[in-house]
Amino acid sequence: MFGSGYGLLIARSAWETGRRNRLMTGLLLFLLVVGIYYVGVKGSSRSAFNRWKPQVVEFWQGEDIYLRYGFPTPPVMVMILTPFSLLPGSLGMMAWFAFKSLLVVVVTVSVRRQVDRWSHPLPDWVVGLALLLASRPVMGDLLHGNVNLWIMGVVVAGIVLFQQG
């Protein structure tokens, strides 16, 4: 019924899916290792999130955290960090880490899909190299609890929405 070309098409599709799954598995393992280090080894003492947590709470109590502490981000970040800051103990820090890790996965998938739509699909070694080159700044942001990955997510979401019309 189907020629041998159909079988090759199915085999190629399975191979492509497997390669992409391996890249995603590698990314998830990277995030897991960084997360274990962040929570288990580094702890809550050196996280920017834990430095900002009391400042976010004071902001909602009427304190001008920009004058008092020199809070380094725009007010929208206070709104974004508020739900995480209300969580007890280090749970807020871990939830912020998990949220940013999810953003990294979503951004990676979104950018890959956008590039594949604009041109021929990139070879996996190119995507792997890009992920490897991005690993240090991503790890730095995750380990310090900063907001740069959030900004990256907003920028990529804007590009994706703009492209969709």
Image (cartoon, grey):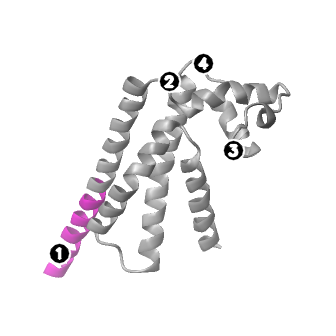
Which residue is the site of mark 4? Answer: 88
Name the image quarter holding the N terminus: bottom left
* Residue at the image point whose x is 40% and y is 56% from the top: 134
Task: Say what secondary structure mark 4 lies in.
Answer: loop
Q: Which residues are magenta?
A: 1-21
Q: Earlier in the sequence, mark 2 or mark 3?
A: 2
Which residue is the site of mark 2? Answer: 44
Residues packed near mark 2 inside 10 Å, few (<14), some (14 to 19) or many (20 plus) = many
Q: Earlier in the sequence, mark 3 or mark 4?
A: 3
Name the image quarter holding the C terminus: bottom right
Residue type pointed to by label 4: Pro
Query: What's the distance in space between the residues labelled 3 and 4, CA to CA?
Result: 23 Å
Query: What's the distance in space between the residues labelled 3 and 1, CA to CA?
Result: 53 Å
Q: Are marks 2 and 3 in contact (CB under 8 Å)?
A: no
Task: Say what secondary structure mark 3 lies in.
Answer: loop
* Residue at the image point whose x is 37% and y is 80% from the top: 120
Q: Tell me if residue 101 can be seen.
A: no
Which residue is the site of mark 3? Answer: 73
Q: Are marks 1 and 2 in contact (CB under 8 Å)?
A: no
x and y, in percent, of residue 88 in the image: 60, 18
Task: Say what secondary structure mark 1 lies in.
Answer: helix
Residue type pointed to by label 1: Leu
x and y, in percent, of residue 46 in the image: 50, 28
- The label shown at residue 8 is 1
* Residue at the image point whose x is 56% and y is 55% from the top: 152
